[in-house]
Image (spheres, rainbow, N blue to C red):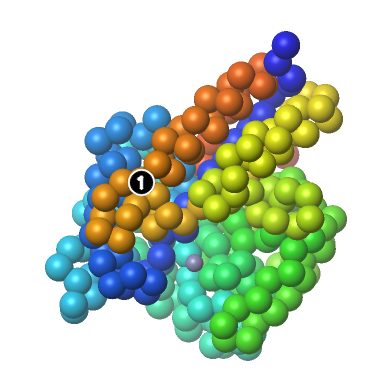
């Protein structure tokens, strides 16, 4: 009784060391090891902020990230704080380039996918992202109002709820000739992000059922979570990781075909289809 096919993308924000919890670096290491030990049953797009070792931090993520990327299942992309949309072009360019350089120098990875801190980006952000060689942005939350501590505040159009080739002149305009793919986060009714850890499990299942009732041949689902939510402050696992695996099991029960992919593979596929 399955309903069509669903392409599932899960992005994970891996925040800067010690930003929210003083032992966050232990959490990073455990989270990365967990993904490696589990042989990554679910492809995730890890959007990583500040990978380089900090003076007070005893562990460095770089080798683990390189190992994760080399398994070829998951993708390592770039996440940049603070909220960018409030800054003029030049300042944004400096901030994003610095973080890009840190990642490339530290891990050898050339990230393809980007997301902005607090979901706050604008057309200037996209221009810079593209100039640095990244080809996917995963920051847009359709129809949502977002606000950051640095005063950035914006509301996204709800026109786009599926991947689109985005204009670097205007965030909510499609440009078929663009080489930057926008992959909006899936939004539940009343403008809330499908966050795998903070959204109740029954609400997530309800959202899957609502999707299935649309009876489309092909569905797009972009869920997200923060890596620190799957770990306790002491680095121990909590139940969220199992919740994520269970959500994927439920998708297999609802849809005929479930394709778990990274953002980069979505880009490759859409680019191939466009060339035909
Ligand atoms: Zn963040």
Residue 266 at least partly seen? no
Q: Nearer the viewer, residue 234 or 87?
A: 234
Q: Residue 169 vs residue 24: left or right?
A: right
Q: Residue at x 37, y 74 (%)?
A: 19
Check disc 1: other Cα within 10 Å, few if <14, some if 14-19, many if 20+: few
Residue 19 at least partly seen? yes
Q: Which residue is mark 1?
A: 238
Q: Nearer the viewer, residue 272 or 157?
A: 157
Q: Residue at x 63, y 72 (%)?
A: 120
Q: Position of residue 99 (x, y in %)?
A: 40, 73
Query: Which of the 4 image quadrants contains residue 191?
Result: bottom right
Q: Position of residue 16 (x, y in %)?
A: 37, 69
Q: Nearer the viewer, residue 28 or 89?
A: 28
Q: State whether residue 177 is above or below residue 262.
A: below
Q: Residue furthest left?
A: 58
Which quadrant holds the C terminus?
Answer: top right
Q: Residue at x 57, y 70 (%)?
A: 118
Q: State whether residue 206 is above or below residue 171.
A: above
Q: Residue 248 vs residue 220: left or right?
A: left
Query: Which of the 4 image quadrants contains residue 242?
Result: top left
- Does any atom of ligand 1 lie closer than 8 Å to the CB of label 1? no
Circle 1 — which element? loop
Q: Residue 190 vs residue 48: left or right?
A: right
């Amino acid at each position: 009784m399955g309903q069509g096919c669903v392409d599932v993308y899960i992005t994970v924000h891996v925040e800067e060391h010690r930003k929210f919890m003083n032992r966050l670096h232990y959490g990073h290491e455990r989270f990365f090891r967990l993904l490696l030990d589990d042989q990554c049953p679910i492809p995730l797009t890890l959007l990583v902020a500040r990978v380089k070792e900090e003076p007070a931090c005893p562990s460095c993520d770089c080798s683990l990230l390189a190992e994760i990327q080399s398994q070829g299942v998951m993708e390592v992309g770039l996440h940049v704080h603070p909220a960018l949309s409030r800054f003029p072009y030049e300042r944004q360019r400096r901030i994003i380039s610095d973080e890009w350089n840190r990642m490339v120098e530290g891990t050898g990875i050339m990230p393809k996918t980007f997301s902005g801190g607090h979901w706050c980006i604008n057309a200037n952000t996209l221009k810079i992202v593209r100039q640095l060689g990244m080809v996917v942005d995963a920051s847009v939350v359709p129809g949502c109002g977002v606000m950051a501590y640095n005063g950035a505040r914006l509301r996204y159009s709800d026109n786009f709820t599926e991947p689109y080739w985005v204009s670097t002149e205007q965030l909510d305009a499609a440009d078929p000739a663009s080489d930057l793919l926008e992959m909006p986060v899936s939004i539940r009714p009343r403008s809330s992000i499908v966050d795998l850890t903070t959204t109740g499990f029954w609400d997530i299942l309800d959202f899957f059922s609502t999707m299935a009732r649309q009876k489309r041949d092909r569905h797009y689902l972009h869920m997200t979570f923060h890596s620190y939510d799957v770990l306790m402050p002491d680095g121990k696992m909590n139940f969220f990781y199992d919740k994520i695996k269970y959500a994927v099991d439920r998708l297999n029960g609802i849809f005929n075909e479930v394709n778990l992919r990274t953002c980069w593979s979505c880009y490759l596929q859409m680019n191939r289809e466009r060339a035909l």
